Amino acid sequence: MQAQAAPRVSWALILFLVVLHLFLRLTLGYGHSAPDLFVVALLLATREVSLGTGSLLGLLLGILEDGFSVVSFGAHAFSFSVLGLVSGRIRDIFVGDSAIFMAAYFFLGKFLRDLLYWIAVGDLARDPFIDIFLPDALLAATYVGLVGVGVSMLSETTSRRV
Amino acid sequence: MMYRPKQKRERSGQSKFFALSSVFFSLLLLYLPAELQETPAYLIRATVLKPFILAQEYLVQRRVHSIEVESLQIRVDSLLVVIASQVTHKEENMRMKDLLGVAERIPYGHTSSNIIRPGTPGSEGLFLLDVGSRQGVSVNAPVVLGEGLLGVVQDVQKSSAVGIDWTHFQFRASAMTRDGSVYGLVRSDPGGFREADRLLIDGIPFHQQLNFGTVLVTSGLGGVYPRGIPIGEVFAEAESSLGWRRSYWVTPFVNPGEAIHVVIISPVEDDLDYKELWNFGVDSSGGSESTERVILTDSVGMN
């Protein structure tokens, strides 16, 4: 009988990240000072689940984020569901547990999510590209990259102990 | 519940179809008509996000209660003195209003509320109010602070509402100088970063000029904002387009970040001039008038 490889992340961790994201950004009102933990949760999840599940998870997270988008409802849902789909397709490129690879994975994921949101949000609500992406989106992506590596390493350590 | 291991991942066409359906559904949401988009957004706020919003409301209330207790005590003491000295004035005032037939013109329909900021991407310029249609709040009701106009209510539910402040890209207000000689349309103009957002008054005829420091108030045109609510003061000319029109940068009186407790003006059927509630002094062209303002937004001032 073949032994099954232990999963590296659990639904509990994903749920924790989602709740923490909402708590930091919504309840405490930290806004962009808090990392985008939805992206971290989605990118971690899509490494383990099927393409469809990853995209559906992205859709649900996006709809949650869209709760306060009065004029561009659906833009977050679109960006997250596409991110879920894309990360599910390319996850095999970012193989192994190298911190650099993981940082690049989270960095690119966050940047892609911001880019997709910027495209989907529409002309009215859209700030100029340069204002959004230099340096805000790069900093936000770096922030998510660092936090994502930290979370994935913590998750790895925990799963090994288990 | 744990994930399935990598070896068990599905790569079937069914999974791809499921993924593409999710993307398609998100596009469907994105292109829903604006009226239909409000319902799912409200449902999300009223269900999944409700605990987080309630927690934020609780924290905001705690903060409001904890800060400036000493300052509030001083204000209460001052108000008690004022009220005690104006008991006879109020009675006299009511008698005179009856005589003049203007008692119904006083806007008693104001509602006070705490402001909650969502803090999520895409919600910049938006705020939540902890009052709704049950408290008499309606769509397009102006939201003001003691210093002047903050924004407008955009969506109302039974016990909550969503508003936009002047930094929101959809914010527009018809404005005029206090003497009503110059009219224009005020809109938000995003700065290089959020803290640098400012207002721009546009559509001023080329032959009319505004001095720096000129106070702008709502004109009452358009039927959204009552006449006379302070907006800001002119600080620089933005452009003069080919001899047709002028536009000026405006420094708003209200900083959205400072807004914790606000007043929502309920629509009044008459043409009450709110200019009387903000006594700016005498001269309309001076640059230092705003510092001389006496703000009369409390209940004593309204009576």
Image: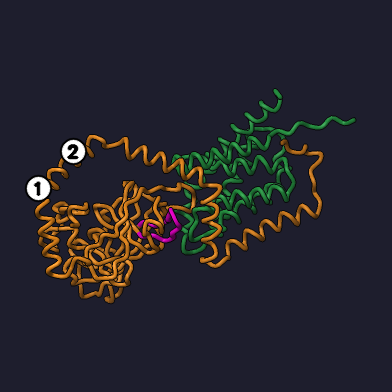
Chain colours: A green, B orange
| In this rendering, the label closer to the viewer, 1 or 2 | 1
Residue B7, can we see it? yes
Question: Residue B74 has which mark?
Answer: 2
Whether B179 is drawn above or below A20: the answer is below
Badge 2 crowding class, 10 Å Cα cut-off, few under 14, some 14 to 19, many 20 or more, is: few
Badge 1 crowding class, 10 Å Cα cut-off, few under 14, some 14 to 19, many 20 or more, is: few
Image location (x, y in percent) of residue B98: 15, 66
Image quarter where the C terminus of chain B lies is bottom left
Residue B167, can we see it? no
Whether A102 is drawn above or below A66: the answer is above
A158 or B130, which lies in front?
B130
Q: Quadrant of residue B266?
A: bottom left
Is A61 placed left or right of B117 in the picture? Answer: right
SS under mark 1: helix
Q: Residue at x 25, y 58 (%)?
A: B232
* Circle 1 residue: B85
Is B18 placed left or right of B33 in the picture? Answer: right
Indicate the amino acid at tag 1: Ser
Range covered by the magenta-colored residues: B152-165
Q: Name the chain letter of the residue that bears numbered label 1.
A: B
B75 or A6, which lies in front?
B75
